[in-house]
């Protein structure tokens, strides 16, 4: 469950991430991505909860001193938030690893049109 | 006649007195304005000198941060994680100090500072975890890649001499 104080932020962040407007960055942890604002950073990652036997998306709030001051996680199976946070994680990952950009370039070089066919060889 | 003469000279003296008073007043105003300008110039020069000192100290601090990043990279490479953790803490403190110099005067760089500190915070978390669980695997290569990016950013800041402090700040 997303804590109430974060709910609007998560929704807005998800919308802006979908529009490619959030500058997510890779970190030293392969599946953890970071976005920074003026005084705070927000990290997002995904993992598997052995007890629940399900995937979850985790969040950490990092203060201006580099300390994690808050963290929460949302099970992907959560009906209200699971889809949103999983989608946000996917968007953050694609942006940080420049996956959409790579797909666009490859599609252009292959001559794939918007319908996804028409490979020129 | 003597009375009229006396009055005449008295008027002349009064007029002369008035002229000297007005002249003296004008002279005083001009002197005050000159003094104010000299004081203002001196203040501006002092502020400029202070800014230059601040800027040089800050560039020196950024350079010191960059050296610390390279030290941490060597420590991680040599798997000296405990020493690496101590130096990461030093590095974060150094960056916080540099940021305090330029707080409120940066644009996008505010986010870059925070990103560097956030990235270092994540590395600190990894090293902290390693201290608790010695058997935990750490990917030194990935950590050092992140540290290299931070070092590049620091070099960029030094190279571009981006942070000229605003006058009077």
Image (spheres, rainbow, N blue to C red):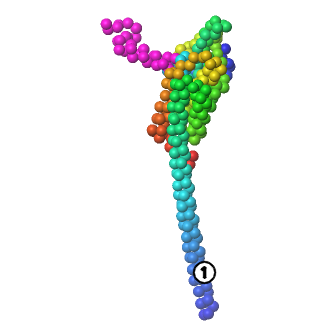
Does any portion of residue A24 appear in the rendered image?
Answer: no
User: Where does the image place residue B3, in percent across and percent down from the top left?
Assistant: 63, 91
Residue furthest bottom in the image: B1
Does any portion of residue B128 appear in the rendered image?
Answer: yes
Q: Is residue A76 above or below residue B71?
A: above
Q: Which residue occupies 45% across, 38% down?
A: B159
How crowded is the residue under tag 1: few (<14 C-alpha within 10 Å), some, or many (20+)? few
Q: How many marks?
A: 1
Residue at image mark 1 = B14
**What is the quadrant of the C terminus of chain A in the image?**
top left
User: Where does the image place residue B154, in percent across and percent down from the top left?
Assistant: 50, 34
Q: What SS does tag 1 mark?
A: helix
Q: Is residue B142 above or below residue B55?
A: above
User: Where does the image place residue B95, in percent across and percent down from the top left?
Assistant: 57, 35
**What is the quadrant of the N terminus of chain A in the image?**
top right
Query: Which quarter of the figure has residue A102?
Result: top left
Q: Is residue B169 above or below residue B136?
A: below
Span highlighted in magenta in the image? A93-121
Query: Which quarter of the figure has residue A15?
Result: top right
Name the chain under label 1: B
Q: Which residue occupies 58% across, 14% down?
A: A46
In front of the other: B88 or A12: B88
In front of the other: B4 or B76: B76
User: Where does the image place residue B35, in percent across and percent down from the top left?
Assistant: 56, 63
């Amino acid at each position: 469950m997303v804590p109430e104080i974060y709910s609007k932020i998560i929704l807005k962040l998800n919308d802006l991430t979908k529009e490619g407007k959030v500058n997510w960055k890779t970190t030293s942890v392969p599946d953890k991505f970071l976005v920074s604002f003026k005084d705070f950073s927000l990290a997002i990652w995904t993992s598997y909860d052995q007890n629940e036997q399900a995937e979850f998306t985790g969040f950490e709030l990092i203060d201006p001193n580099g300390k994690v001051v808050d963290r929460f996680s949302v099970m992907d199976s959560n009906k209200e938030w699971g889809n949103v946070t999983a989608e946000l994680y996917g968007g953050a990952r694609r942006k940080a690893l420049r996956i959409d950009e790579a797909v666009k370039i490859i599609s252009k070089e292959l001559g794939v049109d918007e319908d996804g066919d028409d490979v020129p060889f | 006649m003597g009375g009229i003469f006396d009055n005449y000279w008295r008027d002349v003296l009064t007029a002369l007195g008035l002229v000297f008073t007005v002249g003296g007043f004008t002279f005083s105003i001009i002197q005050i304005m000159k003094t104010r300008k000299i004081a203002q110039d001196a203040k501006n020069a002092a502020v400029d000198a202070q800014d230059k000192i601040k800027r040089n100290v800050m560039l020196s601090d950024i350079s010191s941060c960059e050296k610390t990043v390279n030290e941490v990279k060597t420590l991680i490479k040599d798997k000296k994680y405990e020493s690496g953790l101590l130096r990461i803490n030093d590095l974060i403190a150094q960056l916080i100090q540099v940021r305090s110099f330029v707080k409120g005067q940066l644009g996008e760089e505010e986010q870059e500072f925070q990103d560097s500190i956030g990235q270092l915070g994540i590395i600190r978390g990894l090293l902290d975890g390693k201290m608790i669980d010695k058997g935990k695997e750490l990917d030194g290569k990935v950590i050092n890649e992140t540290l290299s990016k931070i070092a590049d950013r620091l070099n960029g800041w030094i190279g571009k001499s981006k942070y000229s402090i605003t006058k009077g700040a």
